[in-house]
C-alpha cells in the first residue's frame, strides 16, 4: 500500500513538473517537432516516466534531472536563437526536393526520403499530380512547403484587378459558458451594456448563452444551451 501511495504522489509531482516545464519551454518546443524539439520531448517524457514509476530512483534525483534538463534546454534555445550556425547544426535546415519541376534525387537520398513519402506529403497539400509542382521544400519539422507552377496556382483578386474590401477583423469572443469576457470587450472598445442590449434584442439572457462571438465581418453569433433542434444528428 505504501508503494502505491508513493507512485500516486510521484505521478502527481511528475505531472505538475511536466506541465510547468512545458509551459516555460514554450509552445514551439511542444508543437513543431524539429530534431532538437523531438529530442527534448522524448527526454522530458522519459524523465517524467521514471519519476512517476521507477521507485529505485530517488524522487529528488528525478526532480534534479528534470531541472537540469530544463536549464540545458533553455541554454540550447538561447544559443540557437543567437547563432545561426548552431541552429542549423542542431535543428537542421530545409531541403529542396523539387526544383523547377525536377525531383532532386540526391537531396531525396540525403533526407532519407522516398518517392512514396514525397507523394504522400504532396497529397496532404492537395497536390495529386507531381508535374504541377515547381518547388517542394522539406522543412526542419518534417512538413513540406510547395509552390505550384503558374498555370496551377489559385487566382487572386490582384490577378483579376478586382477592388479590395477593407481588411477583416479578428474574431472577438464575447461570452463563453455564461461568462462575459470583459478583457476582450475592453481590448476591442466594446461595452458590457452594448452586449446586454444585443442579448435583449435576441430575447436571450446571459445564462442562456453557451458561446457568443463577433465574427471577422462584424456579425454576431450566439449559441444558446437550448438549440431547439427537432432531430439532432448526433444525439446520445
Image (cartoon, helix red, strand yellow):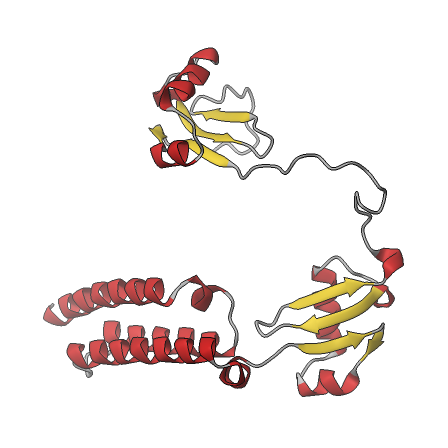
Above or below for 156 versus 195: below
- Could you tell me which residue is drawn at 63 percent across and 72 percent down? 139
Of 37 and 87, which appears nearest the observer? 87
| Quadrant where the N terminus is found in the figure | bottom left
Residue 176 in view, yes or no: no
Residue 207 in view, yes or no: yes
Above or below for 165 versus 27: above
Q: Residue furthest left?
A: 2
Q: How many marks?
A: 0
Of 233 and 22, which appears nearest the observer? 22
Give the x, y percent position of residue 17: 26, 67
Give the x, y percent position of residue 96: 72, 77
Give the x, y percent position of residue 207: 34, 22
- Could you tell me which residue is drawn at 82 percent across and 66 percent down? 133
Q: Quadrant of residue 199?
A: top left
Left or right, 112 with reference to 28: right
Q: Quadrant of residue 8?
A: bottom left
Q: Residue furthest right?
A: 151
Above or below for 153 versus 103: above
- Could you tell me which residue is drawn at 64 percent across and 76 percent down? 94
Give the x, y percent position of residue 171: 52, 37
Left or right, 166 with reference to 18: right
- Could you tell me which residue is drawn at 49 percent across and 84 percent down? 86
Amino acid at each position: 500500500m505504501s508503494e502505491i501511495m508513493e507512485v500516486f504522489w510521484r505521478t502527481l509531482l511528475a505531472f505538475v513538473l511536466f506541465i510547468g516545464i512545458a509551459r516555460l519551454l514554450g509552445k514551439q518546443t511542444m508543437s513543431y517537432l524539429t530534431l532538437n524539439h523531438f529530442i527534448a520531448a522524448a527526454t522530458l517524457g522519459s524523465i517524467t516516466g521514471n519519476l512517476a514509476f521507477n521507485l529505485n530512483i530517488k524522487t529528488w534525483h528525478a526532480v534534479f534531472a528534470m531541472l537540469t534538463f530544463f536549464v540545458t534546454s533553455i541554454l540550447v534555445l538561447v544559443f540557437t536563437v543567437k547563432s545561426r550556425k548552431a541552429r542549423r547544426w542542431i535543428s537542421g535546415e530545409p531541403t529542396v526536393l523539387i526544383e523547377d519541376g525536377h525531383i532532386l534525387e540526391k537531396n531525396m537520398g540525403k533526407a532519407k526520403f522516398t518517392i512514396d513519402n514525397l507523394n504522400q506529403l504532396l497529397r496532404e497539400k492537395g497536390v495529386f499530380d507531381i508535374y504541377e509542382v515547381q518547388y517542394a521544400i522539406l522543412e526542419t519539422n518534417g512538413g513540406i512547403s510547395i509552390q505550384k507552377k503558374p498555370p496551377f496556382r489559385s487566382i487572386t483578386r490582384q490577378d483579376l484587378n478586382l477592388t479590395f474590401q477593407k481588411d477583416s477583423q479578428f474574431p472577438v469572443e464575447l461570452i463563453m459558458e455564461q461568462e462575459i469576457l470583459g478583457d476582450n470587450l475592453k481590448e476591442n472598445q466594446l461595452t458590457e451594456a452594448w452586449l446586454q442590449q444585443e442579448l435583449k434584442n435576441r430575447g436571450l439572457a446571459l445564462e442562456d448563452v453557451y458561446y457568443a462571438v463577433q465574427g471577422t465581418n462584424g456579425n454576431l453569433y450566439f449559441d444558446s444551451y437550448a438549440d431547439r433542434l427537432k432531430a439532432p444528428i448526433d444525439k446520445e
